[in-house]
Amino acid sequence: MAVDQIITNIRYSPALPPDRGTGLLGYLEFDLAGLRISGVTLRRTRHGRLTLSFPVNHDRTGRQHAPVRPLNARARAEIERVVLDAIGTLDGGTGATGGDGGQAK
């Protein structure tokens, strides 16, 4: 099954304007193969590329543990492609820099 068929119910909430200046553009949640994935953020890198950042937890020693993450670069690229395409629909195609958020797929 194609990734764009197993990622559904994408919800996007834009970040507040002060946060956008730091590269944080918004917050995402979506269903992936029957699992609800939340806590994902949309960010713009220093080089201007849009990317998804997956949540991490920190243990008492400060080590990071990802409760959910893409397994490899190919999986990340496919998830980003599907989600960013959906966000473009949600925000009127402005590249996830505006809009009121919402739901797609």
Image (spheres, rainbow, N blue to C red):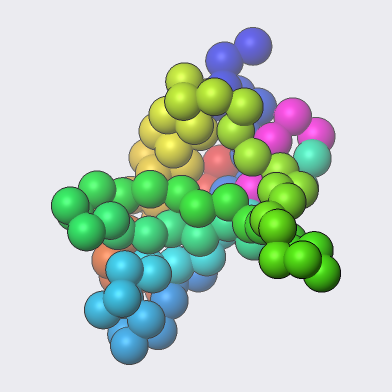
- Could you say where residue 6 lies in the image, as x and y percent from the top left? 65, 27
Q: As displayed, is residue 21 above or below residue 31? A: below
Q: Residue at x 28, y 56 (%)?
A: 45
Residue 91 appears in view: no
- Could you say where residue 52 lies in the image, as x and y percent from the top left? 46, 49
- Looking at the rendered image, the quarter that the C terminus falls into is top right
Q: As displayed, is residue 19 above or below residue 35? A: below
| Residue 92 among those drawn in magenta | no
Where residue 42 sits, quadrant-wise, is bottom left
Q: As displayed, is residue 30 above or below residue 102? A: above
Residues rendered magenta in the picture: 30-34
Q: Residue at x 50, y 53 (%)?
A: 53
- Which residue is situated farthest in the left direction here? 47
Q: As displayed, is residue 73 above or below residue 42? A: above
- Could you say where residue 55 lies in the image, as x and y percent from the top left? 64, 57
Q: Residue at x 49, y 32 (%)?
A: 76
- Looking at the rendered image, the quarter that the N terminus falls into is top right
Q: Residue at x 51, y 60 (%)?
A: 41
**Most common secondary structure along the magenta stretch:** strand
* Position of residue 87 in the picture relative to residue 64 (left or right): left
- Which residue is situated farthest in the front direction here? 61
Residue 20 appears in view: yes
- Which residue is situated farthest in the bottom direction here? 18
In front of the other: 47 or 75: 47
